């Protein structure tokens, strides 16, 4: 019953704010809070060398098959963002006819899911996908070969070497331990009603209620990259995959792990 209520509420909210089911083009008006990172922008406060933006580097379509998937995943590297999409009719049928909750985002938004490519935190030199979903919560269980079930676009940030990798992996490890299972997924956050802490500075700030978009935004902030999108309020502020990949940002001086453990500012 709870899932049905969430689905119905999501349908009403997204229909009212996202325009047409079939057409997700820019011609269909959408409010800024649903699909765009908006003012004030931290990137505008940064020096030129500290500004960051993402650029499109690969596009995969299921019609290209396994060979197409191999070619596109070979282009991916640590730090890339994978924004997944489904056709509006396909997603809409799953959502409205089969009541599959996962399909809500794909139905009403350009992208329905977001992954961050990282190296396996255990120290193995293997690239995995860091995300949060309604089935497994925050996790790194998926790999490149799992990307064939959706169309997707890959985005790469400028100056990935500025990200504090130790802090990023620290966030990943802590969030996975704290956010076990689908019950940890932020159903209300996925509708824009209250987000998890998008600006964690210490380990105790890494809380719950993440979505695929908010967990990436929070992880990057913890590692020294403040996205323009993270300036949003925690209420009535839907954070979408498109907002993240189109957001600019600024690099900041991330704290060390020792500072994060003792709670120093």
Image (cartoon, rainbow, N blue to C red):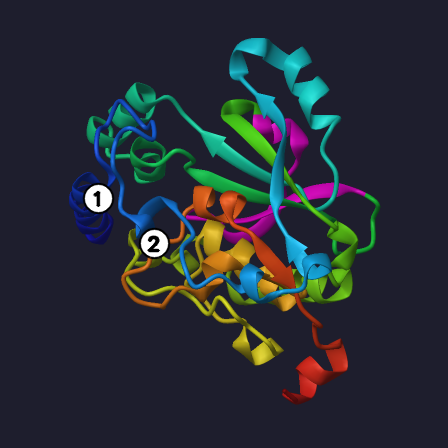
Q: Position of residue 220 (x, y in %)?
A: 61, 59
Residue toward you, 36 or 181? 36
For label 1, the residue is: 17
Q: Secondary structure at mark 2?
A: loop
Quadrant placement of the C terminus = bottom right
Query: In the image, is residue 247 part of the stretch drawn in magenta?
Result: no
* Res 163 label: none
Q: Position of residue 69 (x, y in %)?
A: 65, 19
- Asked if the residue at tag 2 contacts the one at tag 1, i.e. Cβ–Cβ closer than 8 Å, the answer is yes
Q: Position of residue 241 (x, y in %)?
A: 46, 44
Residue 137 vs 254, above or below: the answer is above
Residue 80 vs 24, above or below: the answer is below
Residue 176 appears in the rendering? no
Residue span colored magenta = 126-147
Residue 224 appears in the rendering? yes
Measured Cα–Cα span from mark 1 to mark 2: 11 Å
Choose top left, top right, bottom left or bottom right for residue 251: bottom right
Q: Residue at x 66, y 89 (%)?
A: 264
Instruction: Sort mark 2 into few (<14), some (14-19) or many (20+) by Cα contacts within 10 Å.
Output: many
Q: Secondary structure at mark 1?
A: helix
Q: Residue at x 27, y 61 (%)?
A: 236
For label 2, the residue is: 238
Choose top left, top right, bottom left or bottom right for residue 255: bottom right
Query: In the image, is residue 131 part of the stretch drawn in magenta?
Result: yes
Q: Residue at x 21, y 34 (%)?
A: 19
Q: Position of residue 233 (x, y in %)?
A: 36, 68
Q: Residue at x 17, y 50 (%)?
A: 5
Dot placed on the residue nearer the N-terminal end, 1 or 2: 1
Choose top left, top right, bottom left or bottom right for residue 232: bottom left
């Amino acid at each position: 019953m709870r899932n049905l209520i969430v689905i119905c509420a999501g349908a009403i909210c997204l229909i009212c704010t996202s325009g047409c089911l079939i057409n997700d083009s820019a011609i269909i008006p959408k409010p800024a809070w649903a699909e765009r990172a908006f003012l004030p922008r931290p990137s505008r406060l940064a020096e030129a060398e500290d500004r960051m933006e993402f650029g499109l580097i690969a596009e995969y379509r299921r019609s290209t098959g396994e060979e197409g998937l191999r070619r596109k995943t070979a282009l991916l590297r640590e730090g890339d963002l994978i924004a997944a999409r489904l056709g509006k009719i396909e997603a809409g049928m799953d959502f409205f006819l089969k009541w599959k909750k996962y399909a809500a985002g794909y139905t009403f938004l350009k992208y329905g899911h977001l992954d961050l490519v990282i190296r396996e935190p255990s120290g193995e030199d293997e690239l995995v996908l860091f995300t949060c979903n309604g089935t497994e919560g925050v996790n790194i269980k998926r790999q490149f070969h799992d990307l064939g079930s959706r169309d997707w676009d890959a985005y790469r940030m400028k100056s990935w070497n500025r990200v504090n990798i130790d802090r990023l992996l620290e966030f990943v490890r802590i969030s996975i331990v704290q956010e076990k299972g689908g019950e940890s997924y932020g159903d209300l956050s996925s509708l824009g009603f209250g987000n998890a802490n998008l600006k964690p500075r210490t380990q105790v700030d890494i809380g719950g209620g993440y979505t695929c978009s908010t967990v990436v935004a929070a992880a990057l902030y913890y590692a020294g990259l403040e996205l323009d999108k993270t300036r949003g309020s925690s209420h009535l502020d839907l954070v979408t995959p498109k907002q993240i990949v189109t957001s600019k940002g600024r690099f900041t001086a991330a704290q060390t792990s020792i500072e994060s453990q003792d709670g120093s500012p």
